[in-house]
Amino acid sequence: MKILNTFIKINLIFILFWINLGFCQQVLWNSETYSTGQVIVAEGKAPIVKGNIRSAYEQALNKAMEDAITKALCLVLPKPNKLIKNTQDFIISYSILQQNYTDYCYLQIEVKIDWERLARALNTKGILSTGGGEKVLLFLKLPSADIDFQPQILPIWERFFLIFGLRPVSVQIREDELLDYAFKSGIPLVFAFSLKINPVPKGWQLMAKGRLIETTHQKIIAMAIEKSSIMAQETGTIEALVKSGQNLASGLTLKLATHLHLWLKKQKQNIHKVSLRVSDIHTYSEVFIFLKTFREIRGMKYLCLREISAKEVAYEGYYSNPIPYLLNELTAYGFSIDRVKGGRIFLHK
């Protein structure tokens, strides 16, 4: 018994040394990296009746596809069963990983999901408020060295934002540069996730924290924390740590989903149709220079040139923040506001 306890203690010290040696690895890339076509591994099973293998195969395949969509929805909804029908409509492609035939047909498949279409369906049904493909900047701070948490945790957050109709991206920058980079790049949301591991008597304690930050006002939309403990084992300690970290990340998704849903819903309610009417424009080049300038304003969407006359040039589009913010932006670009009438803003350079 003494020999076994000594062996476990040595293993704990060894693992702690490597975790502390490289703690707080920043999981980012050299250039802006997008999540594309995240896949989900799913399973399906159906009985073989009267030797009809083909029928059992088709039933098992349908159940596996339903399982894939359910696993995706579990990240944001506590009870996702049967919320979405015709699950095959949201499957881009699949491949068979395993298949076994006994009294049952068992299939394990890898599914590529049409996240954009799934997000639209959830929004149309009123189940979730989803975005329109806006970016969200991901920042993961993970324990490094011999334990690689990234393959298990990063896909969870990519899928979480994809199902909300957002595009998760990452860049190689320091944590203190996140908000400044996002603001200058027009990225409305930043998500920061951290995982810490601390030794406790006879085992380990893990703590995961997730923060959703609105870039424009540098305001924390939501923050959640999950904790767990695992006992030290003679074997399988690293696998248990990785699994526990994965479970903590999955637990955070449901806590943050409601806040993100409400934030996206509020953003849609704040969208205003605006008409910018600019006087004293003397050349055609100025017309298009101003169009480019207005499109660069944070929160401006779908702006187009509506009308050109000798008196004024009219630009129309949508603005996703309160009108006073737009007035501040316009003055920051050097425009003078003549008057405001509803969504019509009269101004000159």
Image (spheres, rainbow, N blue to C red):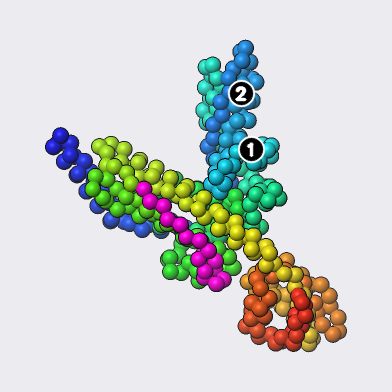
Asked if the stretch drawn in magenta spans residue 213, the answer is yes
- Residue closest to the far front: 79
Residue type, mark 1 in image: Lys
> Is residue 287 something that shows in the picture?
no
| Mark 2 residue element | helix
> Is residue 307 something that shows in the picture?
yes
Q: Residues within 10 Å of mark 2 (few under 14, many from 20)?
A: many
Residue type, mark 2 in image: Tyr
Q: Mark 1 points at which residue?
A: 82
Which is nearer the eye, 26 or 31? 26
Q: Residue at x 56, y 49 (%)?
A: 76
Write down the quadrant of residue 341 in the picture. Answer: bottom right
Residue 266 position, x and y percent, is: 64, 63
Above or below residue 320? Residue 333 is below
Contact between marks 1 and 2 (CB within 8 A): the answer is no
Q: Mark 2 points at which residue?
A: 57
| Most common secondary structure along the magenta stretch | strand
State the extent of the magenta-drawn residues as a range: 212-228
Q: Residue at x 52, y 69 (%)?
A: 219
Numbered tag placed on residue 42 in the rendering: none
Asked if the stretch drawn in magenta spans residue 316, the answer is no
Q: Residue at x 59, y 68 (%)?
A: 186
Query: Which label's residue is closer to the chain start, 1 or 2?
Result: 2
Residue 42 position, x and y percent, is: 54, 35
1 vs 2, front mark: 1
Above or below residue 4? Residue 176 is below
